Amino acid sequence: MGRSNIIMSIYKIQCLTTDDFYIGSTNNFTRRRYEHRNRYNCNTKNSNDKLYDFMRLNGGLDNFEFSILEEDISINKRLVEQKYINELKPTLNAIKSYATEEDKRLSLCKNSTRYRLKYPDKVKEYDKEYKKKEYDCECGKTIKVFKKARHERTKNHINNTSTLILPLPLDASPSPSQSQ
Ligand SMILES: [Zn+2]
């Protein structure tokens, strides 16, 4: 049971001269702090650009304090991190993907055979909603999303969009003498 000694930490990086801060999570705070310093020092692109750019413009690393908000051996760091992000609303985190990842996972689930067999009613409801979704096609018609592929092969759609793609012939440019 060696894994049970891993301590999950939710930490904060607070700017000492403004109210701005960042919330992160890690299973090794010492290493993570070192990584932050490292990434601050090398100018490579990464997911925390917002944080490092802000640090560079606001006094550098020395003007930021690292602290642990919560640590435990058993916390689900991503969930708890998200809880802190939702509650404290850090200004230096890039928009977190956890919620959207969760949505993606759910929608993937809904399309899986196992989910469909297990929750037929939920799936029916979900499909019903999906079938109602519409979009305004570039051809000028309002089309059901699930019929998009079929619609784009119709003559009506092709005829009404191909003219938009073709460049105008030179002599077709609008001019006052175009009366004939
Ligand atoms: Zn169309």
Image: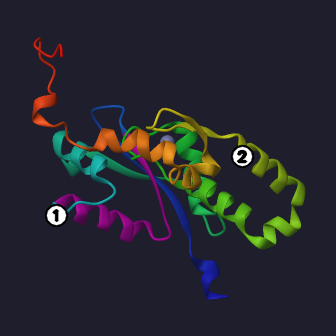
Q: Is residue 90 left or right of residue 39?
A: right
For disc 1, the marked residue is: 42
Q: Is residue 97 above or below residue 173?
A: below
In which quadrant of the rendered view does residue 134 lie? top right
Tell me the tag on residue 18. none
In which quadrant of the rendered view does residue 17 lie? top left
Q: Nearer the viewer, mark 2 or mark 1?
A: 2
Q: Residue at x 57, y 59 (%)?
A: 78
Q: Residue at x 81, y 56 (%)?
A: 123
Q: Is residue 15 visible?
A: no
Q: Secondary structure at mark 2?
A: helix
The magenta segment: 21-41
Q: Is residue 50 visible?
A: yes
Q: Residue 48, percent across and down?
A: 32, 54
Q: Residue furthest front?
A: 180
Residue 108 magenta? no
Q: Residue at x 80, y 72 (%)?
A: 114
Q: Residue at x 70, y 47 (%)?
A: 130
Q: Residue 103, percent across and down?
A: 62, 53
Residue 28 magenta? yes
Tell me the tag on residue 131. 2
Say which amino acid is labelled 1: Cys
Quick one: label 2 or label 1, which is nearer the N terminus? 1
Nearer to us in this view, 137 or 112: 137
Q: Does ligand 1 reach within 8 Å of label 2's beta carbon?
A: no
Q: Is residue 94 left or right of residue 107?
A: left
Nearer to us in this view, 18 or 76: 76
